[in-house]
């Protein structure tokens, strides 16, 4: 995807596919789930003609148990 699309990919109602029924909410929902519900982060690496990679990092609870 191009740089301008990448800048807005997580914005609500941003879509490049409105003429085919896209609402622009999909990546916004993913962003909110990862960052707010799971306490993680999502990073994007993209280059036109090369593809797009999303990296999702979700923290795990520490296993601090004493027997």
Image: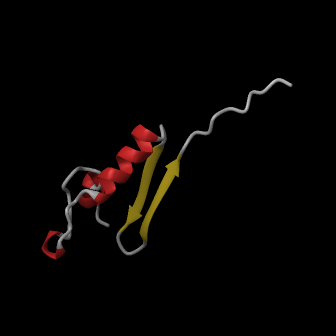
Which residue occupies the extreme left position in the image?
19
Residue nearest the viewer, comparing 59 with 16: 59
**Residue at 17% across, 71% down:** 21
Quarter of the image for residue 16 reads bottom left
State which quarter of the image contains the N terminus. Answer: bottom left
**Residue 53 appears at what percent x and percent y?**
46, 62
Residue nearest the viewer, comparing 44 with 39: 39
Quarter of the image for residue 62 reads top right
Which residue occupies the extreme right position in the image?
67
Q: In the image, is 55 to the left or to the right of 7?
A: right
Residue nearest the viewer, comparing 32 with 44: 32
> In the displayed structure, would residue 26 be above or below residue 58?
below
**Residue 66 appears at what percent x and percent y?**
82, 23
**Residue at 32% across, 51% down:** 29
**Residue at 40% across, 62% down:** 46
Which residue occupies the extreme front position in the image?
67
**Residue 37 appears at what percent x and percent y?**
43, 40
State which quarter of the image contains the C terminus. Answer: top right
Colouring method of the image: secondary structure
Total count of labels: 0
Q: In the image, is 3 to the left or to the right of 61?
A: left
**Residue 6 appears at what percent x and percent y?**
30, 57
């Amino acid at each position: 995807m191009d740089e301008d699309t990448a800048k807005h990919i997580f914005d609500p109602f941003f879509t490049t596919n409105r003429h085919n029924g896209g609402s622009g909410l999909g990546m916004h929902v993913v962003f909110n789930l990862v960052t707010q519900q799971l306490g993680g982060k999502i990073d994007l690496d993209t280059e036109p003609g090369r593809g797009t990679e999303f990296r999702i990092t979700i923290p795990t609870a520490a296993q601090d148990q004493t027997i």
